[in-house]
Image (cartoon, rainbow, N blue to C red):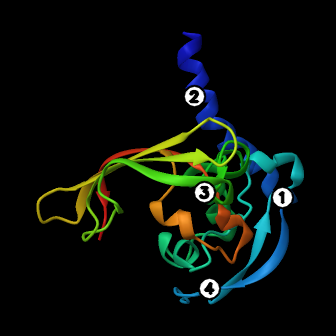
Amino acid sequence: MIWLLIPLVFLLLPVIMVAVGLPFAKPTRYIKFTQYKSPTSGVYQMQLPDWLKWFSNPEDGLTGDSRGWYWNTYFPAWVPSWFKMWWWSGVRNPYNYLKRIVIGLDIRKFTFHKLCGQDYVRDDFNSCGFQILYARPKSGWLVRPMLYWVRRWGQSDRAIVVQIGWKIKLSHNSAIEEDEWDNFKGVTFEPNFYKDIS
C-alpha cells in the first residue's frame, strides 16, 4: 500500500506547494512576448520564493514560455493570472528546477551521440520517427540516455509521442546558447498516446 502512496504524494506535492508559494511570489523582470501577443503583449515574470526553489522554473518563472503561447492561448482570456501561474508550475510543469538543474545536465559538459534511429525527431508532422541518444560527460563516466518516438495516427493531427530520459539533441554538440538557462536540459517522462502535433 505504501508504494501506491509514494507516486501520489510526488504528484500532489507541487500542486500544494506552488499554491502555498504563490502569495509570496516576486516579479523578476518584464518579458515582452516574442510571438503570441493577444490579449497580452508581455508580462512580469514571477518566481516562487527560494524555499520552494525545486518547484520553480528558473527560465520561465510562473508565467510560461517567452513566446507568450502559454499565457495567451492555453486558457481563455477570463482565466485569472494566479490560476495560470499555479497550473504552469504546479500541474503542467512541476519540479522544473529539480529536473533541469539538480538532476539535469549542462550541455557544455557533455558530448551527444546517437545509439540508433534517426538524427532528428520532434513531435511535428515533418519530424516523426524514432531515436535513442545518449550524452557522454567530458569528464566522468555516467551517460544520460534519451528515447524519443513519434508515430502519427494516419493523417490525423494526433500521434503517439514517447520521450523518456534527458531532453537532448545531437545539435547540442555545437550549440551556443544566449540564455544561460538554455544550457541546462532536464529529465522528462512523457508517454502520450494521443498528442496533438499540429
- The residue labelled by disc 4 is 33
Q: Who comes first in sequence, dot 1 or dot 2?
A: 2
Determine contact: label 3, label 1, CB under 8 Å: no
In the displayed structure, 16 sits above or below 158; it is above
Q: Earlier in the sequence, mark 3 or mark 1?
A: 1
Classify 10 Å Cα crowding around label 4: few (below 14), some (14-19), many (20 and above). Answer: some
Image coordinates for residue 178, horizontal then vertical, percent: 69, 78
Q: CA distance from mark 1 to mark 2?
A: 25 Å
The mark nearer the N terminus, 4 or 3, is: 4
Please name the amino acid that badge 4 sits on.
Phe
Q: Nearer the viewer, mark 1 or mark 2?
A: 2
Tell me what residue is drawn at x 65 percent, y 66 percent: 182
Check the image and report above or below for 124 versus 129.
below
Q: Secondary structure at mark 1?
A: helix
Q: CA distance from mark 4 to mark 1?
A: 24 Å
Report the side of 174 relative to 138 (left or right): left
Q: Residue drawn at (11%, 59%), measured in percent from left and top?
A: 154
Percent of width and height locating residue 198: 29, 71
**Residue at numbered disc 3:** 87
- Name the amino acid type tagged 3: Trp
Q: Which residue is mark 1?
A: 23
Q: Which amino acid, mark 1?
A: Pro
Q: Earlier in the sequence, mark 4 or mark 1?
A: 1
Residue picked out by circle 2: 8
Spatial separation of the CA atoms under disc 2 and disc 4: 35 Å
Determine which quarter of the picture holds residue 5: top right
Above or below 138: residue 28: below
User: In the image, is 126 to the left or to the right of 120?
Assistant: left
